[in-house]
Image (cartoon, rainbow, N blue to C red):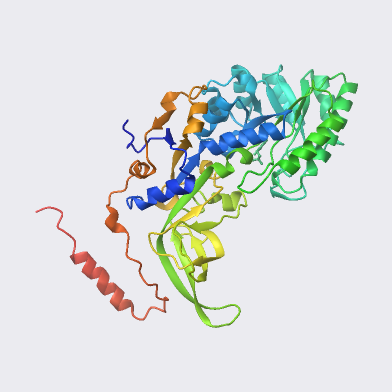
Amino acid sequence: MKINTVEDDRVHVLNNNCNVWSVIREIADTGTQEDAFYVCDIGDIVNKHKIWKSAFPRVEPHYAVKCNDSLTVLEVLAALGTGFDCASKAEINKVLDLGVNSNRIIFANPAKPISHIRHAADVGVNTMTFDNEIELHKVKSVFPDAKMVIRIRCDAKVAQCQLGMKFGCDPDNEAPQLLRLAQQLGIDVVGVSFHVGSGCGEPGVFRRAIAQSRKLFDYAATLGYHFNLLDLGGGYPGGQGTSITEIAEIINAALEDYFPDPSVHIIAEPGRFYVASAYTLACNIHSIRGVATKDLVTEAPSTHYMYYINDGVYGSFNCILYDHQQVVGQPLKDYPHSKLHSSSIWGPTCDGLDQVVAETLLPELHVGDWLIFEDMGAYTLPVASPFNGFPIPKVHVVANENVWILLKDILPLTENHFVIGTTAASLAKTMNIDRDAEWILPSLPITISLPICSVGSIMQEHVLDYVDVEPISN
Ligand SMILES: *Cc1c(COP(=O)(O)O)cnc(C)c1O
């Protein structure tokens, strides 16, 4: 099967003894790959789903589409049977286009443009959240049959991204008032939702939030409502080496204590959890500056190395600015026993803000070397821009044979979504650059940049470059 098209976003089935690093290494070793690229392992997403199902037997995940809206991710999750949390008309359409039933979608944006509410009504997405009076009036006017879920505020003391300052009504004062208004307007409210904050660092917050929700279930009953939906929102970690075990223990115990009735439907909206570790980014070092500095301890003169790579904060690493992620760059090549140097990593654009890692220790690297960033699947690609002419990295989606056998016949996935017989090395050609392997420079010694001595000599080179060009035609 022919696979060397630039746009090939099918899943490449690799044999079972490949792993993401070996794939990256093979692609890099072809010498024809220069652009930064991702490898997305859908086996990692399948594995996350298994972890979720065993940690939370009672909690039905509704994947938060904004976290990573790549078609592959959505298709895999649709095949695995998750629901979806959508925040806009376009996200709803994207999920419905996969053939997902509208009842598997929650419209979990408490502040919705009215046309989006109307659209939800048109396509049968009935369940939606709210946290304010105006939203109830809007829903009353364009979608009076909606099933509303009240979003309350309950913030984790520690979180990567707090959400409480923007969404969620006060559960003690505002929520009862909103429920009374909903009752007067004749709007059906069916349950409670919250989001403790993305990248939650305080698992105990879930117990507080579940206890608050219980109070509102009871209050709503006094108004004649019969709530049957509890939505635990997002906040679960998803990077390598993280675990949801502690959060799951706290949530499961709280559910048992406050919501023992199995007829209450429990859902959650994990985003980061499902996708963070599935994506690994490989960036190429294209420039290096050595800067004279002093060793912090010994005060001896030393060199700080500045590595310029071909993806930055305007691309994938926007997650540093918006999602407060801390990323770690690991050299692809082994430099055993080499001395570590004070180093920093910078993106390719001409903006000084475009810094990826401010200070780290790395062996002395060379132009053409690759730096690998793991855990790059959450809140990266959907926000990236090609600012300053640097392209957004392409994604190679891979799976091993076992994952392929598991998924290939589960709609919306089909045999046609997969390509068999690809080797990692041949993936490099799918995003080809117009050079051969010769472009990689021999390891150049880095000299420390000193103040420029004469502008004249630089001018000279430019002039020579200029007169040296080939005539355009003759
Ligand atoms: C962003 C978001 C999520 C996902 O949060 P994670 O921390 O990535 O799990 C879930 N629900 C809502 C309403 C969101 O806005």
Residue drawn 34% across the image and 42% down it: 426
Indicate the quadrant where residue 459 lies: bottom left
The percent coordinates of residue 150 (x first, y second) are: 77, 29
Instruction: Give the total number of marks visible in the rendering.
Output: 0
Farthest residue to the right: give it: 222
Q: Nearer the viewer, residue 333 or 469?
A: 333
Residue 294's place in the image compared with 50, above or below, is below
Farthest residue to the left: give it: 474
Q: Quadrant of the C terminus?
A: bottom left
The percent coordinates of residue 377 (x first, y second) are: 55, 43
Residue 268 located left or right of residue 420: right
Residue 69's place in the image compared with 83, above or below, is below
Residue 90 located left or right of residue 50: left
The percent coordinates of residue 320 (x first, y second) are: 58, 53
Residue drawn 32% across the image and 30% down it: 1
Image quadrant of ligand 1 equals: top right
Q: Nearer the viewer, residue 467 or 347?
A: 347
Residue 427 located left or right of residue 363: left
Indicate the quadrant where residue 270 lies: top right
The percent coordinates of residue 383 (x first, y second) are: 53, 43
Q: Is residue 270 visible?
A: yes
Residue drawn 83% across the image and 26% down it: 179
Q: Nearer the viewer, residue 414 or 214?
A: 414
Residue drawn 81% across the image and 29% down it: 178
